[in-house]
Image: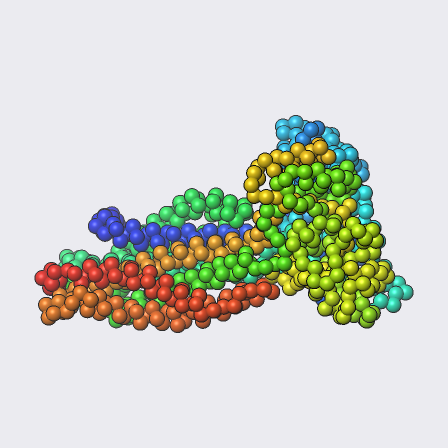
């Protein structure tokens, strides 16, 4: 019998191959999209889980309650104090990243983005396997360096790296003493190069006392230790080391609290994070989309399966007439449905394997598809096949198999009211989901367009940016800035050049505390160091006072620019020419007030800004160029830079590209949601196609009688469409408020955002109506144009 059932299944597949191909393709595409999103969600949730003791590893976070300021950095001596004074702690260590450091090997120079100053205890806390060298002794020498596999291969190829020398900042030689396994991408920090922390002051000049917070402090607690009890001891530790005999206001005292390492990637957005973290809200969003896509795919598959099954009533009658029992028919129909669901699953796996490399490239992730090592995927496969197979096979198995042979052979089969209602509801649900996804896509795109075109208070176009790394790099350039700029400006295609510590879209250095007339009013500001040309090159408006000028030599010492926000928060009525206090001790003079500009992304409100003239602190050189002869201008800039720094690895970016990368997460979100919205439209239309095909097939005789009695083609189309139109309207009424709520919540993450207007929702509604009408009209017109004689012979 099984052989016979399979033969019948393949015959039906061959006879209705178009509908079979549509249903399998839609179902497979839905499952594939679901799998891809689940892989992404699993990857995001797995950050830092690979460490052997991940459940017992914590990071210390610092907070100043009065200033509502939480930072991922702490004072350097904290790690040693934790090791010495807290018996609950197995080990503690500090680390600090130093990005964009130029490293030279022979004649080749590279800019490295993942160099860390670490203590050897880091390897006691985290699972970082050594391939070569000893973790206990590799950092004993102050001028030792540890490399990851990829970096060792990059610099030395197949040669033995241990004992080789790399030069940092063109003068400091470090000997390779260890090679570690590449850390996986699902880490909130990735060590590619590591040097002893004891050398950090040589690079940064930052003090090592309790008064300065600049390191990331991690520790591992003993099994059974209570982190809450440990956290309760921090106030005493701070009083002992930071606030001895101090009269500091309690609200301005630093507080420490613990953060589990596994929560950093999705739940941490503090000041001075090691890397840009994701957000748990995106996990909820993509999980919801994955589930909705799967629901749409299952509904579509079930509708098309039901539509096909109505044609099999005569087969049931004949089988029953020759002795088949209802139980055998139920087994046959359920077996066929499960078999077809399995085919769809296999097709979806093929789609995933085909699409995954491009999906990884788009997300810039390292997702892997390995079901045998992923029990969740196996469970999803089994549940999907069982749910879709059993549900889609339920109509023919439970209803069609119950028909009397005499009714099926006489073609007197009536429609099942329950089944019809279920199909209507299922199509409504499909389009509800589709409308929500379409509306969300339009809102996200609208917000991104708003960001792209918003006046952020500075110019973005035609500006080339060179990164000169940190202080002490390329001293010859730093000591000859004006000479370099003069030589660059000899090229008529170069309009202007300037140097600065930060670019205007990301001023995030320091948090000096400003105070005006009221000593109790303390305002935290962000700081930047620039030269004379920065303000003009970026087109930042001075609304009061003046810019830094060579005509005023005193500008080089004790003069500052502040923005309107700083004036407002410090409550300064006439700011220009007056003094302002920095950190309660240093006094500087305000020479100008800048119009507020967005020194951070539009997620954040405008912050107080203070700017000094300090070109020697340069990290970036910005060069404004004409659009004509761009490549020739770039070549000229490279040659000029090489005169001052022969080993400089000439790399450049345009500022508008740097600016756009700030919103890369939102851009990818918009593209992903748009892609899945398009996929949901396709799948939903396939489901609607099956629904109308079934309706038209069941009402062929009625259509023929109506045409004989004089009904026009338009009358027939309306009769077949009006019921669906009602359900489409219901779908919109339910879906649009849901989309409004979801997008309102999403936009709350932006301090500056669009206003949701009714036009977006009207457009979503009309788009879905037009798409649905096109899909519906195919079967409706075909049925309406059929010869009445053929329609009346149908039954």
Of the pair 253 and 629, the residue shown nearer to us: 629
Q: Is residue 231 visible?
A: no
- The answer to whether 699 appears left or right of 26 in the picture is left
In this rendering, the count of numbered labels is 0
- Residue at screen point 63% across, 28% down: 158
Is the C terminus in the top left, top right, bottom left or bottom right quadrant?
A: bottom left
Tell me the residue at 68%/40% (across/down). Answer: 489
Image coords of residue 326 (percent x, y): 23, 62
Q: For residue 546, which quarter of the picture?
A: bottom right
| Residue 355 vs residue 58, the one in the foreground | 355
Instruction: Specify whether 623 is left or right of 240.
Output: left
Q: Nearer the viewer, residue 512 or 138?
A: 512
> Would residue 434 be seen by someone viewing this image from the given angle?
yes
Which residue corresponds to the image point at 85% horizontal and 59% vertical from the top-left? 586
Kindly indicate the quadrant of the structure image that contains residue 135: top right
Q: x, y percentage for residue 186? A: 59, 49
Q: Against 381, is 112 above or below?
A: above
Q: Nearer the viewer, residue 684 or 764?
A: 764
Residue found at the very far top of the displayed protein: 159
**Left or right, residue 172 beside residue 330:** right
Q: Residue 433, image x and y in percent?
A: 41, 64
């Amino acid at each position: 019998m099984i052989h016979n059932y399979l033969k019948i299944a393949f015959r039906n597949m061959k006879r209705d191959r178009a509908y079979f191909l549509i249903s399998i393709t839609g179902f497979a595409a839905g499952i594939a999209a679901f799998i891809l999103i689940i892989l992404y969600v699993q990857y995001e949730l797995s950050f830092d889980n690979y460490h052997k003791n991940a459940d017992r590893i914590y990071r210390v976070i610092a907070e100043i309650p009065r200033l509502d300021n939480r930072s991922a950095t702490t004072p350097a001596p904290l790690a040693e104090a934790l090791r010495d004074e807290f018996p609950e702690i197995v080990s503690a260590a500090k680390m600090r990243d130093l990005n964009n450091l130029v490293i030279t090997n022979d004649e080749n120079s590279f800019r490295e983005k993942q160099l860390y100053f670490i203590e050897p205890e880091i390897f006691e806390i985290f699972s970082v396997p050594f391939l070569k060298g000893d973790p206990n002794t590799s950092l004993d020498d102050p001028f030792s360096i540890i490399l990851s596999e990829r970096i060792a291969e990059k610099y030395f190829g197949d040669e033995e790296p241990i004992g080789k020398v790399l030069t940092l900042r063109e003068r400091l030689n470090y000997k390779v003493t260890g090679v570690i396994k590449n850390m996986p991408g699902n880490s909130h920090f990735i060590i590619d190069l590591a040097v002893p922390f004891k050398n950090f002051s040589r690079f940064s000049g930052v003090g090592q006392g309790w008064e300065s917070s600049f390191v990331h402090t991690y520790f591992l607690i003993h099994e059974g230790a209570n982190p809450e009890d440990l956290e309760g001891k921090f106030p005493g530790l701070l009083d002992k080391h930071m606030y001895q005999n101090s009269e500091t206001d309690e609200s301005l005292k630093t507080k420490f609290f613990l953060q589990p390492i596994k929560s950093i990637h999705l739940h941490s957005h503090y000041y001075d994070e090691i890397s840009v973290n994701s957000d748990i809200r995106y996990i909820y969003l993509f999980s919801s989309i994955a589930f909705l896509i799967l629901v749409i795919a299952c509904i579509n598959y079930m509708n098309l399966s039901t539509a096909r099954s109505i044609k099999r009533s005569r087969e049931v009658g004949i089988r029953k007439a020759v002795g088949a029992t209802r139980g055998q028919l139920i087994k046959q129909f359920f077996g066929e449905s499960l078999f077809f669901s399995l085919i769809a699953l296999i097709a979806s796996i093929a789609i995933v394997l085909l699409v995954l490399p491009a999906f990884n490239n788009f997300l810039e992730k390292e997702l892997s598809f390995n079901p045998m090592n992923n029990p969740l995927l196996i469970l999803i496969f089994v549940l999907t096949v069982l749910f879709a197979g059993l549900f889609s096979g339920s109509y023919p198995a439970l209803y069609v198999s119950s028909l009397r042979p005499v009714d099926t052979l006489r073609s007197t089969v009536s429609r099942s009211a329950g089944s019809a209602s279920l199909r209507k509801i299922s199509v409504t649900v499909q389009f509800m989901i589709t409308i929500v996804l379409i509306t969300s896509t339009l809102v996200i795109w609208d917000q991104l367009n708003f960001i792209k075109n918003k006046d952020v208070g500075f110019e973005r176009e035609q500006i080339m940016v060179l990164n000169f790394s940190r202080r002490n790099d390329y001293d010859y350039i730093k000591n000859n800035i004006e000479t370099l700029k003069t030589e660059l400006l000899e090229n008529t295609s170069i309009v202007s050049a300037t140097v600065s510590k930060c670019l205007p879209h990301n001023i995030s250095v320091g948090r000096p505390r400003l105070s005006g007339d009221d000593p109790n009013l303390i305002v935290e500001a962000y700081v930047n160091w620039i030269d004379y040309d920065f303000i003009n090159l970026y087109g930042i408006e001075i609304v009061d006072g003046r810019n830094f000028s060579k005509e005023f030599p005193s500008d080089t010492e004790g003069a500052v620019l502040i923005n309107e926000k700083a004036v407002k928060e410090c409550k300064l009525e006439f700011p220009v020419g007056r003094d302002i206090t920095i950190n309660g001790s240093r006094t500087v003079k305000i020479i100008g007030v800048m119009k507020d500009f967005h020194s951070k992304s539009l997620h954040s409100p405008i912050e107080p800004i203070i700017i000094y003239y300090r070109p020697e602190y340069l990290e970036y050189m910005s060069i404004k160029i004409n659009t004509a002869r761009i490549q020739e201008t770039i070549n000229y800039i490279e040659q000029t830079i090489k005169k001052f720094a022969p080993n400089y690895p000439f790399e450049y970016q345009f500022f508008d590209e740097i600016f756009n990368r700030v919103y890369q997460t939102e851009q990818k979100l918009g593209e992903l949601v748009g892609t899945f919205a398009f996929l949901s439209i396709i799948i939903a239309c396939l489901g609607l196609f099956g629904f109308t095909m079934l309706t038209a097939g069941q009402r062929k005789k009625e259509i023929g009688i109506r045409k004989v009695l004089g009904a026009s083609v338009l009358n027939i189309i309306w009769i077949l469409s009006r019921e669906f139109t009602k359900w489409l309207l219901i779908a919109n009424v339910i879906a649009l408020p849901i989309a409004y709520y979801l997008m309102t919540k999403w936009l709350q993450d932006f301090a500056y955002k669009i206003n949701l207007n009714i036009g977006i929702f009207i457009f979503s509604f009309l788009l879905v109506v037009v798409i649905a009408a096109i899909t519906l009209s195919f079967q409706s017109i075909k049925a309406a144009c059929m010869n009445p004689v053929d329609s009346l012979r149908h039954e």
